[in-house]
Amino acid sequence: MRVGIFSNNVRRSLEVKAALTRRFLERHFIIDDENPEVVVTIGGDGTLLSAFHKYIDMLDKIRFVGVHTGHLGFYTDWRDDEIDDLVISLQSDNGQSVSYPLLDVFVTYKDSNKRDVFTALNEATIRRISSTMVTDVFIGGEFFERFRGDGLCVSTPTGSTAYNKSLGGAVVHPTLDVLQLTEVSSINNRVFRTLSSPMIIAPKDWITIEPEGAADFILTVDSDSYHKLKIKEIKFKISKKKIHFAKYRHTHFWHRVQTAFIGDEDAD
Ligand code: NAP
């Protein structure tokens, strides 16, 4: 098996990387960061997010495995002291995997024929900080509302526990093929009105936003951000691509959520 190893630069992660590399070589794995079948990330959810973007053009050929050197994450199943078990599991690998939805973002610009397509694992946001963002919002091609506020966030199910959750969005089970639209500080008064609730968008639908003339929008796609954009239209759709994880153990999703956000009530 060809394995790639992707680590953050934290000292503990680099130690685990060195130990894991030794174990892989002892057991005759091929270390291949250019063309891997399995990518092991070492760090946290942010590390997996970076690895996802590094290998974004090879998603159909790659399965990811996340080792966490901090807390249990949403994309990381293995503790850093379990790498021997991980190597043994990979040795008896028979291709088992679990796949989760991704978000495609299609952007067109004013005064230009340029068109960009991005794919997000967590979410994409469109924001304006200089003054109020005004945009028409369409769901499935039908006009829904005129939004005024700081911005909008569209998240995947696995991204629902990230920025989406901070915006008051729902936590969504990752086996559901849906997107979620949440508002960032909408203006609601007697004159301006938005739904003001997160919306779960069905798999066949898409979200379109057409912002009113400004040249300083900020688009974020996971950890990446693009500034001073003159946006004509953005379409958000569930991607045809998926992210695949090699699955050797099952961490119950709601247990993960409970561990991450509520914890042991006896511990303090
Ligand atoms: P980052 O430092 O890489 O990540 C910020 C935090 O978000 C870290 O604690 C990270 O966990 C956690 N995280 C990432 N993906 C997650 C997920 N799917 N579920 C739960 N927690 C998750 O920050 P960044 O590079 O600027 O942005 C990466 C992501 O962080 C973004 O996609 C966004 O969702 C999230 N973020 C959230 C907020 C917020 O909630 N206000 C602000 C900025 C960014 P680890 O510690 O395990 O890496």
Image (cartoon, rainbow, N blue to C red):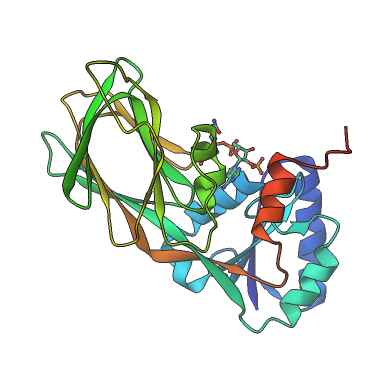
Residue 146 falls left or right of residue 90: left
Residue 10 falls left or right of residue 54: right
Q: Is residue 96 above or below residue 14?
A: below
Specify the quadrant of the image occupied by residue 217.
Answer: top left
Residue at image x 10%, y 34%?
111
Q: Residue 232's x, y, as percent? A: 17, 36
- Inspect this view and state whether residue 43 appears: no
Q: Tell me the quarter of the image containing the N terminus.
A: bottom right
Residue at image x 55%, y 41%?
162
Q: Residue 209's x, y, as percent? A: 23, 39
Q: Quadrant of ligand 1?
A: top right
Q: Is residue 41 above or below residue 1?
A: above
Q: Nearer the viewer, residue 203 or 196?
A: 196
Specify the quadrant of the image occupied by residue 246.
Answer: bottom right
Residue at image x 24%, y 20%?
192
Q: Residue 261's x, y, as percent? A: 69, 40
Q: Residue 102's x, y, as percent? A: 43, 57
Q: How many marks?
A: 0
Outermost front residue? 190
